[in-house]
Amino acid sequence: MAAPGLFERLRDPSEKTLGVLLLAPAFLLLALIVVYPIGKLVWNSFFDMRLSGGSGARFVGFENYVMVWQDPDFWNATGNTVLITLVTVPGALVVGLGLAVLANLPFKRQWPVRLALLLPWALPLAFAGLIFAWFFHTEYGVVNDVLRRLGLMDARDPAMWLLQPGWGFAAICLTIIWKTSSFMALILLAGLQMIPRSLYEAAEVDGASRWQQFWQITIPMLMPSIVVALIFRTITALQTFDIPYTMTKGGPGNATETLAMLIHKNTIEYLDMGYGSTMAVFMFGLSLAVTAVYLRHMARSAA
Amino acid sequence: MKATLSRRIALAASLAAALALSQPALAQTKLRVFSGGQNQRPDLMRKLFDQYQKANPGITIEIETGGSTSELQRQYLSTVLNAKDPAIDIYLIDIVNPAQYYGAGWLEPLNAHLGDPATVLKGFLPVYAQSNVVDGKLAAMPGFADAMFMYYRRDLLEKHRIAEPRTWDELAAAAKKVMQAEGNPNLQGLSIQGAPIEGAVCTFLLPYWSQGKAFNDGSGKLTLDRPAAVKGLQQWLSLVDAGVVKKNVAEVKTGDTVNEFKAGQVIFGINWSWAWDRFADDADSQVKGKVGVMPLPAMAGGQSATCVGGWQWAVSAFSRHKGEAAKLVQFVTSRDASRFLAAEGALLPTYPDVYTDPAVVKAVPWVKDAANVVVAGRSRPMSKDYGQVSDVIRTTTSAVLARTKTPEAGVNEIGSRLQRVMR
């Protein structure tokens, strides 16, 4: 008997063929919007693509990689990015957890609490940055105004928050924590609501205090949600751009410049596409490494 | 009955055919114009374009406006043009940009459309004729001029019988005298721009140039005199220490100087020419009729120098209507357009003879004085890598003014970073 034709096979596909066919559209879409751009980025990183030269792209092998590795600006920006991540991810987790627990309390009206949780999350990052930049402005800022009214600051010698590297950095971290803890809280709130009440009732019967219940039941049961929230938050923290860009523009000097800002500067301002792409490849690697660590941790705790 | 109906149908059909045939003659060419930010007065540009549309029925012109600062506009256009987007046909760029845009292949050289640069640019001010020609190609056309001016409170200087200062030290003394006599704690002596914006490039160059030093030679090679640059930055810091410039100068942007001067809180303010209109015309201006313009002070033993700005019209290399776009550029950069922009919005002419045009002088008397400032002004380094040149100068200058870097360290950084770029 002859092998069935293509048409026949399509009409009565085996399990495997059907699976491939059903996955194909999603796979093609992903290839288009994920694989192609990343491939193109890596490809560009091997070229000298300075648009200002007007001479077209020139293959340079790993030259960009060597230059990036020796670039003090790159290490400064990477250091800032890692520091922002180390401060704001745990910061947002702690604040977010507090908010989630608060929102999970049996309020008579749920919606004002939920709305308050959602609002910072719904605000565009750049707006948050601009608003907080105003807060910390030397002359017009509400922070200095409050300090002045409390008599904690000399009106003739106001603090210049965003013009000092340390304070500027702290102000940026504070803004990021404010902005991102509501996202944390949303994920954690969903997790909290899945914890069965019966566990707490049983614990109460056994005489466990509220504090013990929190550490022995809430936190372990919440762990999967915490890990998911941490993964998302860490990756976005590594890509921090909008808030420092609108608050300090990376200043003073490049004291608060992040990796994403440096990439933007090299590509959009300096028009050095190859060099910027190389830095972006490094950033991609960093995000990948962090994700791998979390996923391993999740797999291990699931096993 | 039947016959008439079919005749009617035939008539209707032939009418429709005639309409369809005549369509190409009525076809509209839509030109999209990027006209910079609000300070580049899109309202006046709209009036000019309306005139053009009336004279050229086949053309409709759409205006798109952008961010308020030169570098925001540059970033936006970089994104659009780097993607080879044909959406924008002509765009307005800062005087520092033609070389960069030409280098990147983003603009259509206008030689083929308008003619040989030497002929086309004959009637323009030399500084604009020079900065719009790159490698012998007409990269863009000068739209209107600009320069950094020293505005001052004429009323206050007259009240306290102080002459216009000629050096920065004299300015500091004058400002202190007025501040003490007025006793207003909100009154600033001098307002300059120290935030990391394009204006900070001029903030760096003004005291440097006024020592008679050049930042680059004719070929664009860096000729930084480090001791002079250090001295220039120290001059600003000593004005901060003396209480003449405010402490958070590294936060001050162009608009801050304008708003604070307008509110009557500044004695001397350095800003672009459009500020004049704000001081004189804005409803909330506290300084109407009280403002004077004088040459920028020099360093002791040096000579006054200022920073030339100004805006150029370029045709996008990706436009689908380059011919029509070039004609529109020719129109908006004509002598008539220049006269209109000067008389209506005090946008400074790029033609020397318009500065003495009776109608313009009548509408905006101070243009006569402005001519000398613009002609004597110097241009920032022209470089295909201007984005980088500007970023290095403004970021470092701002850091020095925020006192997170010493002037020496800042100048060394500018020198070593730009050595590679400007060679």
Image (spheres, rainbow, N blue to C red):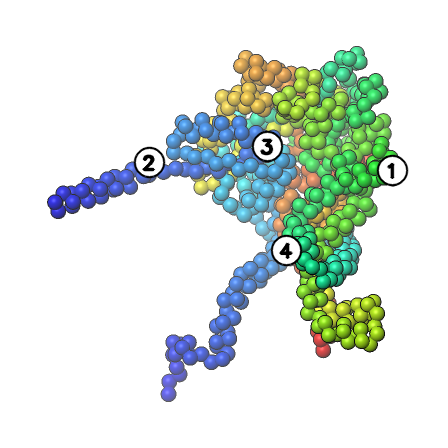
Q: Nearer the viewer, residue B121 or A8?
A: A8
Please indicate, yes or no, whether residue A19 appears anywhere in the rendered image.
yes
Q: CA distance from mark 4 to mark 2?
A: 49 Å
Q: Which mark is residue A45?
A: 4
The residue at 67%/16% (across/down) is B289
Q: Which residue is mark 1?
A: A151
Which class describes the residues within 10 Å of circle 1: few (<14), some (14-19), or many (20+)?
Answer: few
| Distance CA(mark 1)–CA(mark 3) | 40 Å
Subunit bearing disc 1:
A
Q: Earlier in the sequence, mark 1 or mark 4?
A: 4
The reply to whether label 3 and label 4 mark residues of one chain is no
Q: Using the rendered view, name the quadrant where residue B381 is placed.
A: top right
- Residue where numbered disc 2 is placed: B25
Q: Name the spot of residue A61 as percent of width and height, x first.
A: 64, 57
Q: Taking A17 as reference, is A184 above or below it?
A: above
Q: Who comes first in sequence, dot 2 or dot 3?
A: 2
Q: CA distance from mark 1 to mark 4?
A: 55 Å
Kindly report which numbered mark, 1 or 3, lies closer to the viewer in this rendering: 1
Where is residue A288 drawn, in percent x and y?
Answer: 68, 63
* Tag 2: amino acid: Ala
Q: Residue furthest front?
A: A108
| Residue drawn at point x = 43 percent, y = 30 percent | B53
Q: What residue did someone put label 3 on?
A: B38
Q: Position of residue B282 (x, y in %)?
A: 63, 24
